Image (cartoon, rainbow, N blue to C red):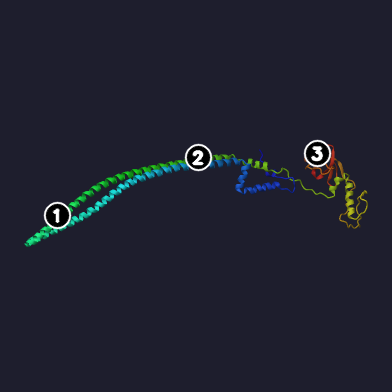
Amino acid sequence: MTQLQFKDAFWCKEFTVHSGYEVLLQRMLDGRKMAKDVEDLLKQSTLKAAFEVLKQQIENVGNSHIQLALMLKDELKGIEEFRERQKEQRKKYETAMDRAQKSKVSLYKKTMESKKTYEQRCKDADEAELGFERISASGNQKQTEKSQNKAKQCKDTANEAERVYKQYIEQLDKARIEWEKEHISTCEAFQLQECDRITILRNSLWVHCNQLSMQCVKDDEMYEEVRVSLENCNVESDMDYFVKNKMTGTDPPVPIGYENYYARESPRCRNSPVQSFGMMKRFSGLLHGNSKNSSETIIPTAPPIDEKVDGVYAAINVDEQAATTPSQDYRVLYDYTAQNTDELDISAGDIVTIIAEGEDGWWTAERNGQQGFVPGSYLEKL
């Protein structure tokens, strides 16, 4: 199939009308505006199907992404619930560990204080014992008894401090054992939570990547449909559609020929060119101030050489008889519609017989038994 050409489809028979060019120009201007160009193409080309597929697939892609977002939201909700559960379990172990640690630290401080007290009491008891021995060696009975009582009192105080110190040691050891058990339990729980967290997040990310990968595959399948529809877009078909729907004409305007003002009066006279010239002469005579009766028959003659012509129009020297030729066949080049009753309608391609060729450009033609004047410039000799 031959593609339609712009040069064959955008003519206009009216010589001053350029609707074909204006259509093409508007087409070119529309091409500069992508949005309007797409809109026009959607209305008049095979690209419409491809664009419709594109819009549908974009909508499908959007819907699939919305579904993916909902799936990810559900996954996120599960992760948040898991995080809250872990938080509650962690707080429970944190509370127990804080209690054990505080008890251990508190007992440790008390134990260290009792140790210092115990050591100080032991030093005091040793000093009192040494003083008692010195005083006993001096032989002073009263001082000896007094020193002995002081040494005994310091000894008892040291024993009490030792008892308290040992008690705190036992309590601290129990707190240490309890703290160690709590620490072990907490570590095990935290390790289990960490394993669960890593496993769940790993699986969640794995699923998320799989969903994204599947979504990419779906997107590519949808866009492949768009590419397939674009392959079906035929540029020549689009151009032909545009030409068929916007064409203004297949023929260029006919040439504009010279038309003599007086020659246009000839067809109306229904007489020979002599009578037509006579009318021209009579009109010229009026311009020269000729007062003869216009109804008289005037034979055109050339003016004298020495005659000064002051009028607007000079006389024309022509033969009195119109040029006649033997009958010949001519082909009509352009359509012509009769403007007067003495003219003949002709159409391009008609074959007419020329009876007489007038000097004014109007020829007497015969077609299908009818005679009339036709423009000679519209004919071509066979």
Query: Which amino acid type corresponds to the residue marked 2 in the rendered image?
Result: Lys
Going from N to C along the chain, the mark reached first, 1 or 3, is 1
Is residue 230 shown to the viewer in this render? no
Which residue occupies 66% across, 48% down?
A: 26
Q: Which mark is residue 351?
A: 3
State the residue position of label 1.
156
Residue 194: quadrant of the picture: top left
Going from N to C along the chain, the mark reached first, 2 or 3, is 2
State the residue position of label 2.
218
Q: Horizontally, is 162 left or right of 201 in the view? A: left
Q: Give the percent coordinates (x, y) of residue 242.
A: 65, 42
Along the viewing direction, whichever of 340 and 335 lies nearer the viewer:
340
Which circle, 1 or 3, is nearer the viewer?
Answer: 1
Along the viewing direction, whichever of 98 and 229 lies nearer the viewer:
98
Density class for disc 3 (Cα within 10 Å; few <14, some 14-19, many ≥20) is many
Q: Give the percent coordinates (x, y) of residue 167.
A: 20, 50
Query: Which amino acid type corresponds to the residue marked 3 in the rendered image?
Result: Ile
Dot 3: element: strand
Density class for disc 2 (Cα within 10 Å; few <14, some 14-19, many ≥20) is some
Dot 1: element: helix
Q: Give the percent coordinates (x, y) of residue 227.
A: 55, 41
Query: Which amino acid type corresponds to the residue marked 1 in the rendered image?
Result: Asp
Spatial separation of the CA atoms under disc 2 and disc 3: 70 Å
Spatial separation of the CA atoms under disc 2 and disc 1: 91 Å
Q: Do the numbered discs 2 and 1 sit on residues whose CB atoms are within 8 Å?
A: no
Q: Which mark is residue 30?
A: none
